[in-house]
């Protein structure tokens, strides 16, 4: 039964892949605008962040859209295309589930966030510009 289930979900994933790629490309929100100084500060803060993901994961797409909206230059590591990225995720976070945001520089250890909504909440809390209204 496990083989049938895996085959079914592979088929579903294959059928949905073009839609996910189109949504990822054309569904991106408008990025926030910051002053050059504020963006430079954000850029420095993002040097400690790495998103482990893969292109067609719908939860990864949601996180990448939030990263785009917040204009964050976060390093992306594709765990499907890069075996070293998958190994680093397993070694550091203990699981290979994506999306996963690795946050270095918080104390002596790297923090690993695994849930897309938790990752988005963290990014908004840390990087959302103050309202100017």
Image (cartoon, rainbow, N blue to C red):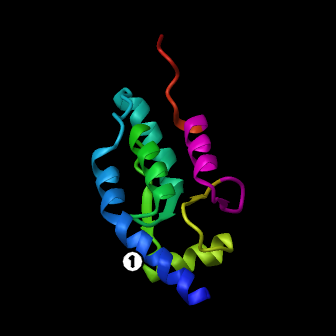
Q: Position of residue 26 (x, y in %)?
A: 27, 46
Q: Is residue 48 left or right of residue 19?
A: right
Q: Is residue 81 above or below residue 118?
A: below
Q: Which residues are the magenta region?
A: 106-125
Q: Is residue 120 above or below residue 39?
A: below
The residue drawn where x is 48% and y is 64% is: 53
Viewer-closest of 128 and 118: 118
Q: Position of residue 1 (x, y in %)?
A: 62, 88
Q: Is residue 25 left or right of residue 67?
A: left
The residue drawn where x is 45% and y is 77% is: 10
Q: Tell me, yes or no, whether the highlighted magenta stretch contains residue 123.
A: yes
**Residue wearing tag 1:** 81
Q: Is residue 6 left or right of residue 26?
A: right
Instruction: Count every numbered label the image shows and give the total.
Output: 1
Q: Tell me, yes or no, whether the highlighted magenta stretch contains residue 104.
A: no
Q: Is residue 124 left or right of residue 15?
A: right
Local packing at callout 1 (Cα closer than 10 Å; few below 14, some 14-19, many 20+) is few
Q: Is residue 3 above or below residue 67?
A: below
Viewer-closest of 108 and 115: 115
Q: Residue furthest top?
A: 133
Viewer-closest of 110 and 54: 54
The residue drawn where x is 33% and y is 44% is: 27
The residue drawn where x is 65% and y is 60% is: 112
Element type at marker 1? loop
Q: Position of residue 60 (x, y in %)?
A: 48, 57
């Amino acid at each position: 039964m496990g083989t049938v289930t895996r085959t079914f979900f592979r088929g579903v994933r294959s059928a949905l892949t073009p839609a996910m790629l189109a949504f990822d490309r054309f569904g991106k929100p408008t990025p926030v605008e910051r002053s050059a100084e504020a963006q430079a500060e954000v850029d420095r803060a993002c040097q400690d962040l790495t998103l482990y993901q893969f292109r067609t994961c719908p939860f990864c797409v949601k996180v990448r859209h939030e990263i785009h909206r917040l204009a964050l230059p976060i390093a992306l590591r594709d765990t499907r295309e890069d075996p070293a990225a998958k190994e680093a995720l397993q070694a550091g976070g203990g699981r290979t589930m994506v999306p996963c945001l690795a946050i270095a520089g918080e104390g002596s250890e790297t923090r690993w966030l695994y849930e897309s909504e938790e990752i988005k909440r963290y990014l908004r809390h840390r990087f959302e510009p103050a309202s100017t209204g």
